[in-house]
């Protein structure tokens, strides 16, 4: 099948049949109709329960793996070092704040920002080590995946012609 005909009345058809080259396939379908059917079929398949269940399984497994990597990224031996770094960072921040309050340079605000970022980074590493379970539930992921798929389908249906061109170009590659 190939796209043929005029731009506003384009159809998918067999070029061999159209040019009487021995093909008996006389099926033709307007591009507009096919694109709507294509997008509708994709949208319907995305809400298939088995597909959504498998998608949630993959997303949740990735989330758990990322959580494990974060927790395992801080060993018991590193905790005292991180606590010391946190104390040093907090002390530096406090000194800079005192200086600013006593009429110090406005440029010091620029120096405070990286210190706060460093403090947040250290605290998040300490919190990750202290937390032993993932707080996000499978139901949370299920709801998020379902909402995301619903949003995606809405976008796909919003501009059917653009969606179809994307799918067709993907199939060609």
Image (spheres, grey):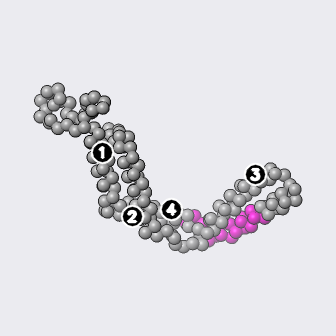
Q: Are marks 2 and 1 in contact (CB under 8 Å)?
A: no
Q: Are marks 4 and 2 in contact (CB under 8 Å)?
A: no
Picture residue at 39% right of the left edge, 56% below the top: 150
- Do labels 1 and 4 touch, CB within 8 Å? no
Q: Earlier in the sequence, mark 4 or mark 3?
A: 4
The crowding category of the residue bearing disc 1, from other C-alpha atoms within 10 Å (few below 14, some 14 to 19, many at least 20), is some
**Residue annotated with mark 3:** 110
Residue under label 1: 36
N-terminal of the pair, mark 1 or mark 3, is 1
- Does 89 lie within the magenta span? yes
Q: Marks 3 and 2, Cα distance to the nearest angstrom?
A: 44 Å
The span from disc 2 to disc 1 (Cα, nearest Å) is 30 Å
Quadrant housing residue 167: top left
Mark 4 vs mark 3, CA separation in Å: 32 Å
Nearest the eye: 166 or 121: 166
Instruction: Give, as a single range, the part of the protein colored magenta.
Output: 72-91
Report the Cα–Cα distance between label 1 and label 4. Answer: 39 Å
Tag in front: 2 or 1: 1
Does residue 58 appear in the picture of this structure? no
**C-alpha gap between disc 4 and disc 2:** 14 Å
The residue to which callout 2 is attached is 57
Numbered mark located on residue 66 in the image: 4
The local crowd at label 4, few if under 14, some if 14 to 19, many if 20 or more residues have their Cα within 10 Å, is few
State the image quarter where residue 125 is shown.
bottom right
Q: Which residue is pictured at 35% across the width and 61% down the height?
A: 52
Mark 3 or 2 closer to N-term? 2
Query: Compared to 99, does 173 lie above or below?
Result: above
């Amino acid at each position: 099948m190939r796209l043929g005909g005029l731009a506003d009345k384009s159809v998918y058809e067999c070029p061999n049949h159209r040019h009487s080259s021995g093909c008996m396939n006389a099926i033709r379908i307007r591009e507009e109709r096919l694109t709507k059917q294509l997008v509708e079929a994709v949208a319907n398949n995305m809400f298939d329960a088995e597909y959504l269940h498998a998608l949630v399984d993959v997303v949740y497994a990735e989330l758990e793996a990322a959580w494990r990597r974060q927790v395992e990224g801080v060993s018991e031996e590193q905790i005292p070092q991180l606590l010391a770094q946190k104390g040093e960072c907090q002390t530096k921040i406090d000194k800079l704040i005192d200086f600013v309050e006593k009429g110090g340079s406005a440029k010091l605000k620029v120096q405070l920002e990286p210190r706060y970022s460093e403090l947040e980074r250290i605290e998040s590493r300490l919190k990750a080590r202290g937390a032993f379970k993932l707080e996000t539930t499978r139901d949370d992921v299920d709801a998020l995946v379902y909402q995301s798929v619903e949003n995606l389908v809405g976008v796909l249906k919003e501009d059917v012609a653009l969606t179809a061109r994307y799918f067709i170009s993907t199939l060609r590659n």
